[in-house]
Amino acid sequence: MAFPEQNIYPEPDTPIKPRPKNRPTPGAIIKHSLLFIATFLCVTFVGIIWVGQSANAETYWEMWPEGALFAALLLAFLATHEFGHYFAAVYHNVKVTLPYFIPIPIGIGTLGAVIKIEERISHTKKLFDIGIAGPVAGFVVSLSILIYGFSTLPEPGFIENFAGHEAVVEHIQETGTFPDEPPETSPEGATIILGNTLLYSFLASFFDNVPPMYEMYHYPFLFAGWLGLFFTALNLTPVGQLDGGHILYSLIGFEKHKKVARVCFGGITALAGIEAIPFLYLNISGWFPEYGYLAGFLWALLLLYFLKKGFYNEVKWILPVWISSLGISLFYLFATSGFDQAGSLIWVFWSFFLIYFVRLEHPPVLFEQPLTPGRKKLGWISMAVFILCISPTPIYFLN
């Protein structure tokens, strides 16, 4: 049987359109939507504890609008960040999942959100665009939330709406301003202090009635904005397959990125030591007062294990980074008398996470391409955002 002659090959000048890969099924949409709803409920629940105006409420239910506001602000950042990645992947026809929101009914109610790239990204430009789209989108939203929060700040007397702040309220009634330091009458271990950042401090300098960092988390716009910028900075850590790792790899290539990532990880472990050594010191001294000095020794052993794992037993990297990281941590603690200040161990967990889940080195892409000047500028700006939004001591507790 004869068939009509057909030209099954496109003409040379005819562009070949890749087949779209990202068409979520109804089941996937339902699954991701349920995760989002569960996360919203968890963030609302814990948000009541952070921003709920407890002085005038008899039950938790009366504070749910305040918790829901905090949840809406924080999830606006998370959703914008992840959908930035998602739409960049869709634009480049890279197969990707919808964002997975991760609920947890403690802390801030969520462990964040992630998308899963379901194929290897083959080109540097695609890698860069997908990596930077999330931080840029999330940064804009967080910055907007923070600026709005600063521009609509109530008078210091607003803190009267929260139970357990009698000493602060008394100081405000006498002076009209917040005390510079947390009152000494606060219960031991009860005062939570959020770490300042360069960008937060800069913005705060333009506004009046800015609460101190030990009261800031009662203000939903300030707290959500601070969290958004801090999470943006964490994602911009120039290590492995984090957003910052994608960006810096695209800017400087595999070999240079490998070196920078290892130096950066050494800096993170120094921050981890600043948290871990006082934590160990306080716990050891509580049980065995004469052996508190073992805190430094125990951290030195754990640090050595981290570096051996992260640097694949390369002694030429392990030894200098181990000495430098440990020296920085101890120098800081002795200089600031910080052994009695308990940290949150965020950097310890972050170091563990980077080693076991992210890895320090970025896998090479198949096709290396030079970035356009515009991409290069945006990439280096994102590295500056990392520095401006990171906090050496994100959360610590007053003893």
Image (spheres, rainbow, N blue to C red):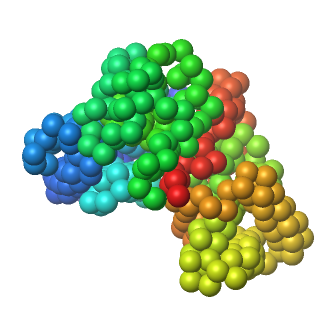
* Residue nearest the observer in this picture, 367 or 211: 211
Locate the N terminus and report the quarter of the image it occupies: bottom left
The relative height of residue 317 versus residue 395 in the rendered view (above or below) is below
Residue 276 screen position, x and y as percent? 63, 67
Residue at the far front: name it: 174
Q: Residue at x 33, y 39 (%)?
A: 166
How many labels were placed on the picture? 0
101 and 207: which is toward the camera: 207
- Asked whether residue 120 appears in the rendered view, the answer is no
Q: Nearer the viewer, residue 80 or 295?
A: 295
196, above or below 264, in the image: above
Say which quarter of the image contains residue 258: bottom right
Q: Where in the figure is residue 37, as x and y percent of width and height?
A: 18, 50
The vertical placement of 40 against 102, above or below, is above
In the image, what residue occupies the spot 72% across and 40% down?
A: 251
- Can you give x and y, in whole percent of width and height, for residue 23 in the image? 27, 47
Examine the image and state in which quarter residue 138 appears: top left
Q: Residue at x 55, y 43 (%)?
A: 195
How far across and down, in percent of the image, does residue 330 sit?
78, 62
